[in-house]
Every structure is written in C-alpha cells, then in structure tokens.
Amino acid sequence: MWLRYRILRPVGLGLSKMSIYRLKWSGSENAPFSGPFIIVANHQTSVDSMAIAIALKKAAKTCQILPWAKVEIKKGQDGFLGAILWRVFGKIPIDRGAEEEAPRAIKKSLELLRKKKIVMVFPEGTRYPRGEVGPFRYGVANLARVTPAPVLPVAVYRREEDNGVQVNIGHPFFMPVIPPDVEEEAARPRNKLEALVIKQLEVARQWGEGIGYDRKVMKLLAGMIDLITRTITRDQTSFKGLFQMAHPEDNEFLRDRVMEVLPDNWRTVEGKSTRERPESTRFFPE
C-alpha cells in the first residue's frame, strides 16, 4: 500500500504547488527516522493528511502513515478527493456512531505501531475555523497512554499572506507519568496484570525520553509495543481500563503541544465548531 505513496508522491508534490494549495513546511528534521510514532495535529483543510505525509518525507519513505478517519470520507460525504485518498493510502476507519469504537481504534493502532507504522490522529474530530483549535477528544489521549510510542505534534493552517497550506512539525515527546495522587478511577489499575502493564509502559517511556529517534531506537520501541500488545491480546478482558487511562489534563497537554507550533495569534476554543456536523456525528464523545 505504501508503495503507492512513493510512486504518487511526485504527483502530490506537483499538485501541492498549485495556487489553491501552495504547500510549504518546516521542522521535518524533528520527526523520528521511522515509526512507530503517533502524529497529533489540528484539522484545517481537506488535504491535511496528504500535506503532512509530504512534509514527513524522511519517515514516509520508510513506513506507512495511517490516519484515523471517519467512514463518511470513504463514502464521499466529505468530497471526492477524500474518498480517493482513502482508497489510495488506507485509513483506520472510525464509525462514530458505533459502540466501543474508541477501543477498537486503539487496538488497531497498537497492531500498526508494533509493526513500525505511523498513526495520525486529528483529535478535534472536525475542522475548525482559521485561527481556532477546538477541544481534543479522549481517543488520542487514551491511545498515547496505552503505548510507549512518541507523539509528534504537527500544525496545519492556511497562511495569512497567500492562503497557502502550511505544515509545521514540532519535536516528539512522550506522555508524562500519571501523578500517583490522581483521582480518576480510570487511571488506577484494577488487577495485578494491569498494574504490571502500566509499570512497563512507564519504564518504556522513561527509557525512550532523551535517547534520540534513529532507526535502532525506533526498532526497540516497536519491540516494546509488541510485547505490551501481546500481553493485552492474551487477556483482553483484564485490560479494559488500559483503554480509558486518559484524564482531562492529557487532552490539554496534547493540545498545548500542537499550539506551540501554530502561529502566536491562534487560540483555543471550547465550544463546537461552526463547521461541525450534527451532534450525532461527534468524534468520540467525552
């Protein structure tokens, strides 16, 4: 599947120079050499996924990037281009009306991360007007909590001067350790096996911080994710809490990292987007 990207990338680069896009990017040197890592980005245009994939040229040459994407895109409800990109590059499908959809997306993402793939998530769940970043949903925070993969913050927006698409890539980071006095029930292990996995996650993250992101390191991280995923797969009923470990501060933490690579005049908003679809299609309700 990713061979298609490598073949079609020159075409994408050509299209990105058209007056309607004028794609530019910065910070591509910050990205890890390859997967496994999680891209967290704000959502501004219908070509955000492709623009980010072009900007991450180093990592995209070595492994596949798969975004979480609502199934309506495949059906063409968000435009012809989105449906084409779905079929060409593949997605992690999200049926926002289905029960237990967030855990299914997290499990699928873990399978991909342990294979050294890259998972891309737009936590706002919908596009917000220029200059605004909406509230982040729990889906990506729960994913980031259940894997020792680094998170790469990315900003996408239309430039004021020429309305071109800009991609800014920040520095990768790991989720901070959950404070021992946290009160959320979801953050506390329910049994010994779950407690063991949580401890393994914390050790892996602490090990990963500050050691770089070259090919050898990313291979070791993939091995750690594989070990944790196998443990979860063997007894899924014992690990339900692992998919609900995020707490409100995690959403703010992730959004702050994206805000750092957006222009200074951008602001966070807490209400629904004026471009958002009806309430029944929200992305992983809180």
Image: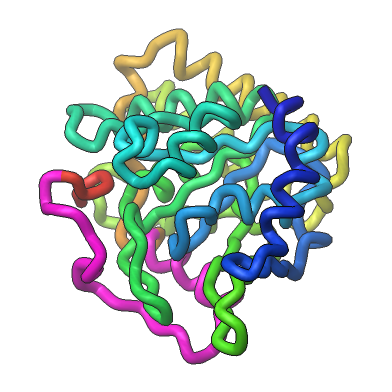
Q: Quadrant of the N terminus?
A: top right
Look at the image and say whether residue 286 sits in the magenta stretch: no
Tell me where residue 269 appears, x and y as whole percent.
29, 77
> Going by the image, does 4 lie left or right of 75?
right
Which quarter of the picture shows residue 7? top right
For the point 68% across and 36% down, the residue is: 36
Tell me where residue 252 appears, x and y as whole percent.
39, 67
> Going by the image, does 227 lie left or right of 207?
left
For the point 36% across and 49% down, the residue is: 246
Q: Nearer the viewer, residue 135 or 210?
A: 135
- Residue 117 shows in this picture: yes
Residue furthest out toward the top: 234
Q: 42 above or below 86?
A: below
Q: 156 above or below 111?
A: below
Tell me where residue 83 appears, x and y as whole percent.
44, 35
For the point 37% across and 38% down, the residue is: 73
For the point 52% across and 27% down, the residue is: 87
> Going by the image, does 225 lie left or right of 72?
right
- Residue 169 shows in this picture: no
Q: Nearer the viewer, residue 103 or 26?
A: 26
> Going by the image, does 76 lie left or right of 260?
left
Tell me where residue 67 appears, x and y as whole percent.
51, 40
Which quarter of the picture shows residue 98? top left
Magenta region, residue range: 251-280
Q: Nearer the viewer, residue 175 or 22?
A: 22
Q: 111 above or below 278?
A: above
